[in-house]
């Protein structure tokens, strides 16, 4: 077990390093000169001033030197200084990561809390009108882009009910009610596609389990249908759902990039959005490393939980 | 069969619901700006100003730093625009056209120039106090602070140095006088001192006793109480402001809301009192005006120029006939009416500025004449037209891309087939436009506040923003001559002649029109007379009526 975890952690580190290298190179390949961008609308800026700014940002070094310096520093938790705000990237991330994690967690809870009952209901009432309606809802949930749903929510709640979420972010410690009110809509917009995917996955997984031999045996023993479903079948059908939840985390983290901007939430997502526009390389790279680490960790935890759900899957 | 019909029913219900949500419009927004035709102007005689209340609004992005000398960003300058002051600033008010160049004293009470145009003397106000915040602690503002500020502006690497390029030196003969000595006469030096970057800082800030990136301690009408980066800024009234009785509003709360829909929702639900032009376009303004009978529309006469620009180092744009053909092929009037909320045709200098060519004359000099455009192309040896790639950025918003498409269609009618190359702002600005790495382009020009900023920057062969490869010795001579002319009447004539020469003999970049900006206020907000400079000094004179929500005054 410990060997498995250590191996997975090492693989995870490798994945993060590869993703970082990929993003590092991609950022440099896309056109756009951060030095000129910073000196936009600059009458009379000389080449010397441009060179001095490039040197101050460390961009005068060869690309490979910059890459290894970033990887080396990142390994010690130092992601450099933001080109824009001149703050340490680590402290920016420390300030913003909890906000995005809260939003992601709320979206995940919505996905699971709605997706599992809907999946169960659809399977329990297989081929009924309820099942068919839930299928339509699920397909719609999977098809509607989360940012579009977010825009609709913010616009039409204002028009129809004269209500809009609070404008300024407050941490749960500052004002819990305001915090949850502001987070509710983006969390819902982010969680809907996860909910739909979980409902679909659980339905098909559950129906497959219901046709298996051990369920037939339980039924043959005369157990009522509800007992068959909830006591025996559900647990056995949760493994693929758990895998899906792990993958959903990636989608949720990606979704925060636009949704945090729409709902004025100062988390990692809106930070990445601005940083890419302004070619703030250290911030983008720092965020990628952190998002990568969150994704790898969640998927490791999910893999380890398989054994808890289904004792047949245990890592020696 | 039964289940299939149920699926169909469910599908129909869902589709109707989705269509209803997507297509339902709460107000008849119609075409042609129906709601905007019935403008409700700001109330001008609401009685004497009443103190108190909180003014709330949103902005789409926040400042990265509060240091007004190292940052050229609009976001930084409006963030500190009510906190710091300048020596002189633009005058605003109900009787002054939006964007007018008239100046008034800010920290300087009076100022004058020597007959040779080389010595400018600014007489400072007495008894002005800095905000009562450590380490400045409300001490008196003196000429030493102006000297510290100017020294810093010159010492810092970067763009702000250009503002003092014509200045040989500065001295402070006494605590209330500052004298600038110029290298060559410069008629608009005082206007230059009202420009971006010219905020006066305390010596404690310039010497590093507090961090100018994160703190702003000024002499302005409002003290910055809190700045939560990318979240909000809260300003509170400066009780020691040097203008008697001002400011009137107790508190200003600015929330950073990047998304336009969220800003609109906040205004609709009464969370804010003002929608800035940055959070509003024509369609949205029409909707809000139709919905809200108490909303007041403010039309800001355009200052931002739309332009087609060409790289004269690349054929066929090296030929004047081709550039003139492009200028005559575009139907500016129809274009601005279709895409913007209003505007005026413009010459090289925006028409509202001193020396700006009147809109009517610009229209006359660059008429929509596709037939003549075809003839000019034939004269250039291109009777069948030609093809080129036109750069444009979506970083200025969707309207700019729509305008580029309009230009594309107009040019096609005379045989010039351009392919649009839509780039993100960083690529457009840093790789294409400023690097002269393009054939032809469509875009906006930063609104400058003085005629000379346009001419010297863009049309002078050595201009810092001459990204078009313009090199015309006669034009250089005309531009340099007007800079030193101190007689306003003569200088205005020289500016007009220079622009006529540009339109007829350079025809690049081709100015199309300046478009109006729209902002919307709640009707209880009074005396909100702003200026397009990068500042918010006008907020000192604004006040809230008794019906403003949560008003405590």
Image (cartoon, coloured by chain):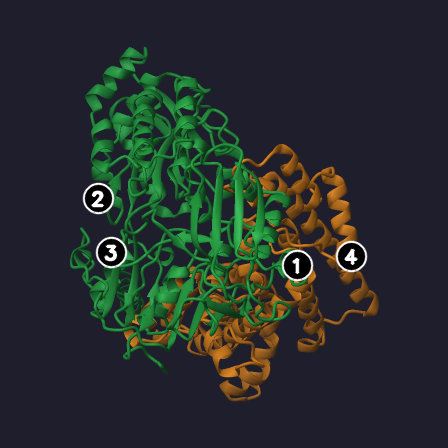
Question: Label 1 is found on which chain of the structure?
Answer: A
Where disc 2 sits, the SS reads helix
Which chain can be seen in green?
Answer: B
CA separation in Å, label 4 and label 3: 62 Å
Marks 3 and 2: in contact by CB < 8 Å?
A: no
The vertical placement of B489 against A258, above or below, is above
Disc number placed over residue A87 in the picture, else none: 1
- Residue B144 picture location, percent across and down: 60, 55
The vertical placement of B500 against A294, above or below, is above
Q: Residue at x 37, y 76 (%)?
A: A130
Closer to the camera: disc 2 or disc 3? 3
Residue indicated by mark 4: A75
Marks 1 and 3: in contact by CB < 8 Å?
A: no
Q: Residue at x 60, y 78 (%)?
A: A235
Q: Is residue A135 left or right of residue B410?
A: right
Which chain can be seen in orange?
Answer: A
- Decide which of A213, B100 is in the foreground and name it: B100
Q: Is residue B7 left or right of residue B463?
A: left
Tags 1 and 4 both on a single chain: yes
Marks 3 and 4: in contact by CB < 8 Å?
A: no
- Residue B24 picture location, percent across and down: 24, 64
Residue indicated by mark 2: B337
Disc number placed over residue B95 in the picture, else none: 3
Question: Label 4 is found on which chain of the structure?
Answer: A
- Decide which of B236, B390 is in the foreground and name it: B236
């Amino acid at each position: 077990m410990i060997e498995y975890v250590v191996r997975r952690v090492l693989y995870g580190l490798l994945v993060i390093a590869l993703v970082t290298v990929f993003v590092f190179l991609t950022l440099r390949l896309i056109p756009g000169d951060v030095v000129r961008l910073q000196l936009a609308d600059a009458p009379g800026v000389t080449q010397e001033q441009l060179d001095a700014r490039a040197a101050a940002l460390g961009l005068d070094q060869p690309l490979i030197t910059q890459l290894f310096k970033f990887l080396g520093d990142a390994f010690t938790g130092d992601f450099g200084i933001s080109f824009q705000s001149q703050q340490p990237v680590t402290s920016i991330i420390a300030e913003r990561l909890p906000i995005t994690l809260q939003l992601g967690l709320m979206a995940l809870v919505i996905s699971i809390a709605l997706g599992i009952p809907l999946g169960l209901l659809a399977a329990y009432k297989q081929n009924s009108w309820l099942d068919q309606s839930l299928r339509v809802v699920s397909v719609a949930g999977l098809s509607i882009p989360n940012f579009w749903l977010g825009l609709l929510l913010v616009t039409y709640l204002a028009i129809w009910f004269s209500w809009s979420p609070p404008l300024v972010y407050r941490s749960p410690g500052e004002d819990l009610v305001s915090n949850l009110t502001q987070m509710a809509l983006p969390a819902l917009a982010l969680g809907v596609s996860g909910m739909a995917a979980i409902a679909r996955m659980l339905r098909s997984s559950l129906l497959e389990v219901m046709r298996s031999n051990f369920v037939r045996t339980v039924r043959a023993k005369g157990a009522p249908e509800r007992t068959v479903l909830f006591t025996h079948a559900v647990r056995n059908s949760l493994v693929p759902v758990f895998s899906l939840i792990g993958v959903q985390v990636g989608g949720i983290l990606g979704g925060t990039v636009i949704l945090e901007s729409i709902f004025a939430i100062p988390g990692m997502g809106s930070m990445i959005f601005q940083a890419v526009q302004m070619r703030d390389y250290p911030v983008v790279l720092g965020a990628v490393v952190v998002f990568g680490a969150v994704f790898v960790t969640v998927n490791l935890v999910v893999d380890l939980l398989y054994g808890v759900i289904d004792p047949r899957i245990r890592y020696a | 069969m039964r289940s299939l019909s149920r699926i169909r029913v469910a599908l129909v219900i869902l589709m109707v619901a989705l269509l209803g949500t997507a297509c339902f419009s709460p107000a008849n927004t119609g075409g042609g700006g129906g709601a905007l035709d019935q403008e409700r102007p700001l109330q001008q005689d609401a009685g004497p100003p009443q103190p108190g209340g909180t003014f709330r609004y949103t902005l789409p992005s926040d400042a990265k730093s509060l240091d007004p000398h190292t940052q050229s960003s609009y976001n930084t300058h409006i963030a500190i625009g009510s906190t710091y002051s300048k020596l002189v600033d633009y005058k605003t008010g109900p009787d002054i056209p939006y964007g007018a160049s008239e100046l008034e004293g800010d920290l300087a009470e009076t100022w004058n120039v020597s007959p040779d145009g080389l010595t400018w003397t600014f007489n400072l106000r007495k008894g002005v106090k800095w905000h009562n915040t450590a380490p400045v602690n409300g001490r008196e503002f003196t000429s030493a602070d102006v000297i510290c500020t100017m020294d810093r502006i010159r010492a810092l690497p970067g763009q702000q140095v250009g503002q003092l390029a014509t200045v040989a030196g500065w001295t402070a003969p006494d605590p209330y006088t500052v004298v600038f000595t110029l290298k060559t006469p410069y008629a608009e030096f005082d206007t230059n001192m009202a420009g971006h970057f010219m905020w006066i800082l305390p010596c404690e800030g310039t010497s590093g006793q507090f961090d100018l990136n994160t703190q702003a301690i000024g002499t302005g009408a409002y003290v910055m109480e809190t700045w939560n980066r990318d979240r909000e800024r809260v300003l509170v009234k400066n009780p020691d402001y040097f203008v008697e009785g001002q400011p009137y509003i107790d508190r200003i709360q600015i929330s950073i809301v990047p998304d336009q829909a969220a800003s609109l929702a906040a205004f609709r639900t009464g969370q804010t009192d003002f929608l800035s032009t940055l959070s509003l376009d024509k369609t949205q303004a029409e909707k809000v005006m139709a919905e809200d009978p108490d909303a007041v529309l403010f039309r800001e006469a355009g200052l931002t120029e739309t332009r087609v620009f060409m790289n004269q180092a690349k054929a066929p744009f090296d030929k004047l006939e081709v550039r003139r053909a492009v200028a005559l092929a575009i139907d500016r009037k129809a274009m601005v009416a279709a895409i913007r909320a209003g505007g005026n045709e413009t010459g090289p200098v925006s028409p509202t500025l001193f020396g700006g060519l009147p809109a009517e004359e610009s229209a006359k000099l660059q008429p929509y004449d596709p037939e003549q455009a075809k003839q000019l192309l034939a004269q250039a040896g291109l009777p069948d037209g030609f093809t080129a790639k036109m750069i444009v950025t979506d970083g200025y918003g969707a309207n700019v891309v729509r305008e580029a498409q309009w230009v594309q269609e107009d040019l096609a009618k005379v045989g010039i087939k351009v392919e649009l190359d839509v780039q993100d702002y960083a690529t457009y600005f840093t790789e294409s436009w400023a690097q002269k790495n393009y054939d032809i382009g469509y875009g906006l020009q930063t609104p400058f506040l003085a005629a000379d900023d346009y001419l010297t920057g863009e049309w002078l062969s050595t201009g810092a923003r001459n990204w078009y490869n313009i090199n015309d010795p006669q034009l250089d001579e005309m531009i340099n001559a007007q800079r030193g002319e101190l007689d306003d009447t003569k200088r205005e004539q020289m500016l007009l002649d220079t622009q006529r020469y540009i339109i007829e003999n350079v025809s690049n970049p081709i100015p199309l029109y300046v478009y109006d900006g729209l902002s919307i206020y709640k009707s209880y907000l009074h005396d909100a007379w702003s200026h397009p400079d990068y500042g918010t000094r006008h907020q000192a004179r604004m006040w809230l009526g008794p019906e403003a929500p949560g008003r405590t005054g």
